Amino acid sequence: MSLIELTNVHAGYGGAPILNGINLSIEASDIAVIVGPNGAGKSTTLKAIFGLLKVTQGTIRFAGEDITNAEPDALVPKGLGLVPQEFNVFTSMSVEENLEMGAYIRRDDFSATMGSIYEMFPPLAERRRQKAGELSGGQRQMVAMGRALMSEPKLLLLDEPSAGLSPRYMLEVFEQVMRINRAGVGILMVEQNARQALGFATKGFVLANGENRFAGTGRELLDNPDVARAFLGG
Amino acid sequence: MDDFIFFINKALVSGAVLGSIYALGAIGVTLIFGILRFAHFAHGDVMTLGGFVAYGLALVAASLGISTFWPTGFIVLPLAIPITAAFALGIDRTVYQPLRARGARPVTLLIASIGVTLMIQGLIRLVAGTGVYSFFDTEPKELIRIPTEWMGGSRPINLTEPQLLMVIVTVLAVVALHFFLTGSRLGKGMRAMADNADLAQISGINTRHVIRATWVIAGGLACLAGTMLALDVSLKPDLAFNIVLPIFAAAIVGGLGHAYGAIAGGFLVGFAETLAVFNWSVVLRPFKDSIPFEVPADLYIVPTEYKLTVAFVILVIVLLARPTGIFKGAST
């Protein structure tokens, strides 16, 4: 049984559909990367999984359970986490409060989880009392990822985690993604920096016009001349 | 010195009382705006309703022969507050929630709240009539006199028992709200939702639950403010409707969506209104020899009839200097 499985998913914001039959499945051990041109429906796929827009056709199953069109806040206790690309921190709240909000569904003691996140992102530990809105872009991305990890998800959805970051920060983010995956969390991420991301992905999906075009391991997609020519800039 | 005591009695006491009422109302307005992103125009009428609920309960208490050291209108608050909160929750369930479920825009919700204004006022007139009522028909309004001989005055500082209770209760409510918003899980969830509603939901915060909590708090504070206002003056069906505009001005001045801003804005507008209609010639009279011009008998910044404009002058001045309010509030 796959951790998450999308079967022929169609979705949109009410107007013209954006997803026209997406199929993908991911195991807990996977780092899966979705690549494709702008407007292909990459971010929309993540939003459809998380119940942020209406799925009009097809099913989404998480650990065998049908979660199509579930309320976003009901998905977090099931083990899903999402890091949106933009507006992904509570700017008026402190770093620590952001992490607490990530653990909102947890009634147990989450101080150990918080400790491990400060360990993973040392700059956050120094700034725990500072408002998230005052942090740099890279530090905000750390807060956003930390917040999503506080609920101890089984599957983490990341929407362009390296967007707007310097190359140094980008590599750091990718390293953390691999580390999170090694700890047993499945990863599904959308990435603009397709070549770097496919380099460490165990699975890759190429989307165009709201449909799957190619699927394979990251290596296979990088070595596929059609993919390289059409989607990876030659 | 007695002129200074006159200033305390007429300006500071009145300003603190008016500021308390504005602050309690503005907190509700600002919380609802922060969570639901619309201006709840009917908030003044929820306050009036709260006052009438307390009045009804006070009548029941009087008929049962319950009489205490404290004003009866104050004693019934622990019962009146949950009733008004439940009513506010009911308004949301029957009016605003169905609109939100259909994706109504904030302006639609604003228009709906004007409808709610008319409905609440109609309901009050239907049940209680159009008359003016006083909590103190059956019991005296106690006057508290603070002697001022120690500071060289001959006249006491006067304030009524309801006025003193009002300021104390406002301070307690504000402190309780502070600890709720910064210390409790639900309070932090409320701040998170006001900050970024989508991200709050993505984090697993049950936003429907937060919305309910917001109405309970806003409705409860509205009952407190409405009852206090009725205890200070008198009760009539359009009691708080008449002050809904300065309450909105207070919320905007403080920074919409910002609870502390609403408190600051409430007291700022309350004091500004009171000081603007205060007769300054009384305070200036002792210095009349050193003032080059003749002090007239009446010297107001604005005449009493124009008191309402003061809130908007403050609003314009503050927004020119800080477009999002004293505290950085939401601009949309």
Image: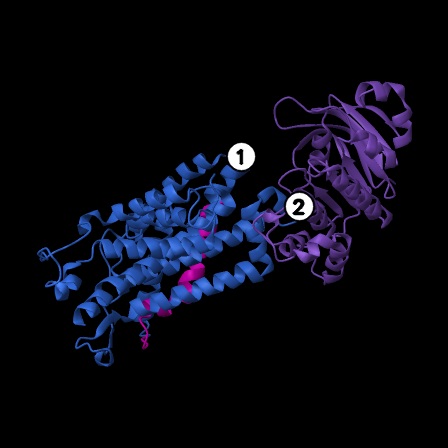
Residue that numbered label 2 is attached to = A140
Q: Give yes or no for residue B271 being in the magenta stretch.
A: no
Q: Which residues are magenta?
A: B67-93
Q: Are marks 2 and 1 on the same chain?
A: no
Q: Is residue A48 above or below residue B165?
A: above
At a point 70% along the width and 24% down the height, the residue shown is A38
Q: Give yes or no for residue B83 being in the magenta stretch.
A: yes
At a point 85% along the width and 22% down the height, the residue shown is A228
At a point 74% along the width and 50% down the height, the residue shown is A149
C-alpha distance separating marks 2 and 1: 31 Å
At a point 86% along the width and 27% down the height, the residue shown is A215
Report x, y in % for residue B153: 19, 76
Please tell me which residue lies in front, A200 or B36: A200
Give the dominant element type of the magenta stretch: helix, strand or loop.
Answer: helix
Give SS at disc 1.
loop
| B186 relative to B162 in the view: left or right | right
Residue B160: image quadrant is bottom left
Q: Which quadrant of the rendered structure holds the N terminus of chain A? A: top right
Report x, y in % for residue A28: 85, 43
Front disc: 2 or 1: 2
Report x, y in % for residue B128: 28, 54
Task: Tell me the amino acid under the disc marked 2.
Answer: Arg
Tag 2–tag 1 contact (CB < 8 Å): no
Give SS at disc 2.
helix
Q: Which mark is residue B103?
A: 1
